[in-house]
Amino acid sequence: MSEQSSQVATPASLEGDLLDPYEKLVTIEILGQRIEVPEKNRLLRCFQYLSLKTISYGDFCWNGECTNCQIWYHQKGQTEADDRPGLACRMEVTEEMVITKLNSFIQLEGINK
């Protein structure tokens, strides 16, 4: 996905129905690609913002029980040696978060699919 294509036009229904209110997009890195996603949202919702169909119809419980949304991440300034696991449905996105690995259930159009 290029820098230009990361500027996703989000349907109004997605913003009103699925996402928590936000004022701006924040930049994160997913598998080496810098992407903008809505602040103040759970990471799994941000994935849905990026790839509506694959995440909406994916095999996720949305409450942390299935672990299908597990990711490995670190913060800016750290390395992959500092990676820690997390569940995207339980984590709020943070500016400059670096996601180095996604569970195989997480298929994001233009990123790993």
Image (cartoon, rainbow, N blue to C red):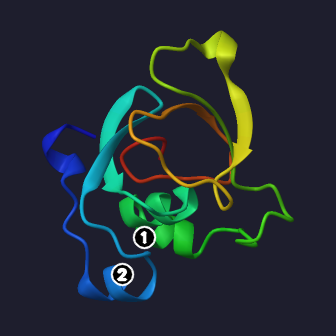
Residue 12 location (% of width, % of height): 25, 85
Q: In which quarter of the image is the N terminus?
A: top left
> What's the distance in space between the residues labelled 2 and 1, CA to CA?
8 Å
Give the residue at x 76% y 56%. Answer: 68
Residue 92 location (% of width, % of height): 55, 55
The residue at the far left in this view is 4
Give yes or no for contact between labels 2 and 1 (Cβ–Cβ under 8 Å): yes
Q: In this view, does 101 lie to the left or right of 63?
A: left
Which label was assigned to residue 14?
2
Using the image, determine if residue 86 lies above or below residue 31.
Answer: below
Residue that badge 1 annotates: 52
Give the residue at x 86% y 65%. Answer: 65
Q: Which of 4 and 83 is in front in this view?
A: 83
Please state which amino acid type lies under the numbered disc 1: Leu
How many neighbours does mark 2 have within 10 angstroms: few (below 14), some (14-19), or many (20 or more)?
Answer: few
Give the residue at x 45% y 22%. Answer: 76
